[in-house]
């Protein structure tokens, strides 16, 4: 069904990086969400009145809230797809995150309303009426919600949409909540025990937790996230694949919405490179990166001395020392300023983010001491910094 809808309503659906195609995916998801949630709202509303169940009625209005969320997601995707203008030179892509954040408040509000209503039902229980028709309606809504969750997850992963992934999580949570409601109805029908208020309380907590998770997931890219390791390696390997590029470092990626990224990177080149030749290669890398990766890349050239044997020896020595101290340490911008009685080794040291000021001072002292053991003339001029790349677990 998902493939049919995509092929039927999304033109050029395979070009998921295109802004127009992403917008079409968002429109499709919004329309499907509105239609399905309105149908579920009416079905559950009828079932709720038949049984007198607060958890079913709350679940019905949760679906009405989901319909409103789908409308917000639809509007957000449309606005996010607008091209750049004079006031927004990097486009409007972050509106998609804002829309998902608004959706999270709708979800949390519904959860809180259900929480207070369920507490009232626990204090003052009301009689329920058991109907197999209501159970059948709820079972059908579980199946619909499961499909909606998988549908939005599939589309969200295709176009890397926070709104769709948030909607998918909400739909799957709704399926679990409705399953709990079915349980309370069946328990009452079999044993006559009314656990409706307690089930409603559990459902409300699940709904609020889902809302908090959606808010967290959408705030992170707005505040600023570390670079996904896969993105980091894709960009660095792309740049280093060009002839004349010795290595790269200091990659920074700024996100202006899904598929809208700007990056800066330092590329190490031979210090003997002619300026005109190097500039031509850098220009080619920047153009190709936009065309092949869809990233606006700015490359800064760092000249590296490649013919000084003594400097190469000290560079290798430093690498061995860092590996022995902490395999997570790395360095770049290595330079040597020689003298008869003193040799300065100048470099930038990249340390893990958990290194505090005291740990940074300690590691600098240890490096300096190890180098002096090899040659007392060696002095370190170190700039300590953190990497902007996340860990594998952060990206999962």
Image (tube, rainbow, N blue to C red):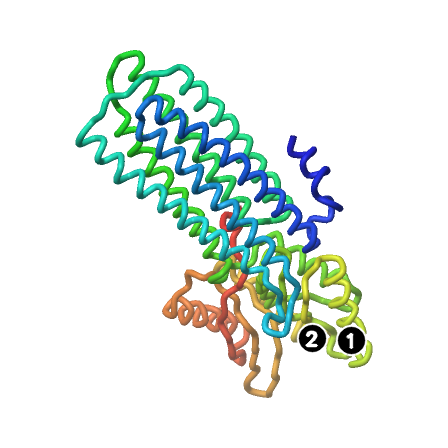
At x 53%, y 64%, the residue is 387
Q: Does residue 273 appear left or right of residue 334 in this picture?
A: right
Q: Dot 1 surroundings within 10 Å: few (below 14), some, or many (20 or more)?
A: some
Height in image: 262 above or below 109? below
- Identify residue for label 1: 278
Q: Does residue 258 appear left or right of residue 183 in this picture?
A: right
From mark 1 to mark 2, how far is it between C-alphas? 8 Å
Give the camera-side residue of 183 and 123.
Answer: 123
Q: Which mark is residue 301?
A: 2
Q: Does residue 383 appear left or right of residue 307 in this picture?
A: left
Check whether the beta carbons of the residues at disc 1 and disc 2 lie within 8 A of each other: yes
* Residue 194, image x, y percentages: 25, 21
Q: Dot 2 surroundings within 10 Å: few (below 14), some, or many (20 or more)?
A: some
Judged from this view, the residue extending furthest toward the top is 190
Give residue 2's quadrant in the image: top right
At x 45%, y 49%, the residue is 103
Height in image: 307 above or below 95? below
Height in image: 311 above or below 242? below
**How many numbered callouts?**
2
At x 48%, y 46%, the residue is 69
* Residue 45, image x, y percentages: 40, 30
* Residue 36, image x, y percentages: 53, 34
Q: Secondary structure at mark 1?
A: helix
* Residue 264, image x, y percentages: 63, 69
């Amino acid at each position: 069904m998902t493939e049919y809808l995509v092929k039927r309503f999304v033109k050029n659906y395979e070009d998921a990086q295109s802004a127009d195609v992403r917008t079409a995916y968002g429109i499709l998801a919004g329309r499907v969400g509105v239609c399905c949630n309105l149908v579920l709202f009416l079905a559950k509303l009828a079932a709720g009145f038949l049984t007198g169940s607060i958890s079913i009625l709350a679940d019905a209005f949760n679906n009405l809230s989901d319909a409103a969320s789908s409308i917000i997601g639809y509007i957000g995707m449309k606005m996010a797809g607008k091209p750049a203008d004079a006031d927004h030179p990097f486009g409007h892509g972050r509106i998609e995150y804002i829309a998902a954040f608004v959706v999270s408040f709708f979800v949390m509000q519904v959860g809180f309303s259900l929480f207070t209503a369920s507490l009232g039902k626990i204090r003052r229980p009301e009689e329920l009426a058991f109907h197999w028709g209501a159970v059948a309606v709820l079972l059908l809504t579980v199946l619909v919600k499961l499909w909606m969750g998988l549908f939005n997850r599939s589309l969200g992963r295709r176009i890397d949409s926070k709104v769709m992934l948030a909607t998918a999580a909400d739909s799957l949570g709704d399926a679990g909540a409705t399953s709990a409601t079915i349980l309370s109805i069946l328990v009452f029908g079999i044993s006559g025990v009314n656990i409706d208020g307690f089930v409603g309380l559990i459902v409300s907590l699940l709904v609020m937790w889902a809302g908090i998770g959606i808010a967290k997931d959408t705030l992170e890219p707005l505040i600023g996230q570390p670079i996904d390791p896969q993105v980091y390696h894709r960009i660095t390997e792309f740049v280093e694949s060009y002839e004349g590029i010795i290595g790269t470092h200091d990659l920074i990626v700024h996100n202006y919405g899904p598929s809208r990224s700007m990056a800066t990177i330092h590329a190490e080149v031979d210090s003997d490179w002619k300026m005109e030749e190097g500039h031509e290669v850098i220009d080619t890398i920047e153009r190709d990166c936009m065309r092949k990766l869809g990233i606006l890349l700015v490359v800064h050239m760092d000249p590296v001395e490649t013919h000084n044997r003594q400097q190469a020896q000290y560079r290798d020595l430093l690498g061995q020392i860092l590996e022995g101290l902490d395999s997570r340490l790395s360095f770049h911008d290595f330079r040597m300023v020689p003298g008869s009685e003193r040799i300065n080794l100048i470099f930038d040291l990249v340390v893990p983010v958990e290194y505090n000021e005291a740990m940074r001072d300690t590691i600098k002292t240890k490096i300096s001491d190890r180098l002096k053991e090899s040659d007392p003339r060696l002095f370190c001029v170190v700039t300590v910094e953190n990497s902007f790349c996340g860990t594998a677990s952060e990206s999962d």
